Image (cartoon, rainbow, N blue to C red):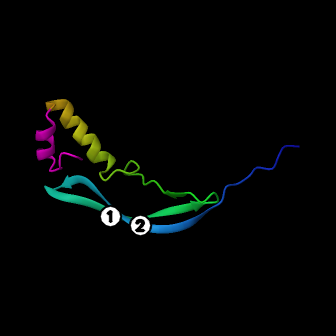
Amino acid sequence: MGHPETKLAASLHKWTERTWRHLDTCQFETLITANVPSVKHQDGSIEEIAVPWAERYQRITKLLAQAVILWLEACGNVSKVAEIMRLDWGR
């Protein structure tokens, strides 16, 4: 007989309101705001649950990141793309 499987339990730790910049809609800046849960594992570590529209620890959506990459490939000028997309240089 095999060893019984050990299940790692996690409990809801807290909810955190997060905001991500998304592609503009009809020339208006679009933000997505959601309450994101984090869980506390048995070992005491805390992990925020990933959302499907953004990479972990990012403040822009996957679609906006993809659009920025396409613009960069097309024109190759970071400053101009940031201006067109209305993003600060750091994003």
- Left or right: where does residue 27 sit relative to residue 13? left
* Distance Cα–Cα, label 1 vs label 2: 10 Å
From the viewer's side, name the closer residue of 33 and 11: 11
Amino acid type indicated by mark 1: Thr
Q: Is residue 35 magenta?
A: no
Residue projecting furthest to the front: 44
The label nearer to you, 1 versus 2, is 2
Q: Is residue 80 magenta?
A: yes
The image position of residue 7, as x and y in percent, is 70, 54
In the picture, the disc for residue 4 is none
Q: Is residue 8 above or below residue 79?
A: below
In the picture, the disc for residue 33 is 1
Q: How many marks?
A: 2
From the viewer's side, name the closer residue of 35 and 38: 38
Classify mark 1: residues with Cα within 10 Å, few (<14), some (14-19) or many (20+): few
The residue depicted at 41 percent of the width and 50 percent of the height is 56
Looking at the rendering, the stretch of residues picked out in magenta corresponds to: 77-91
- Left or right: where does residue 42 sit relative to residue 47? right
The image position of residue 77, as x and y in percent, is 13, 34
The residue depicted at 15 percent of the width and 44 percent of the height is 82
Secondary structure type for disc 2? strand
Q: Earlier in the sequence, mark 1 or mark 2?
A: 2
The image position of residue 26, as x and y in percent, is 15, 56
Secondary structure type for disc 1? strand
The residue depicted at 17 percent of the width and 31 percent of the height is 74
- Left or right: where does residue 53 sit relative to residue 64? right
The image position of residue 62, as x and y in percent, is 33, 46
Marks 1,2: beta carbons within 8 A? no
Residue projecting furthest to the bottom: 14
Quick one: quadrant of the N terminus?
A: top right
Amino acid type indicated by mark 2: Thr
Which residue does the numbered mark 2 point to in the structure image? 16
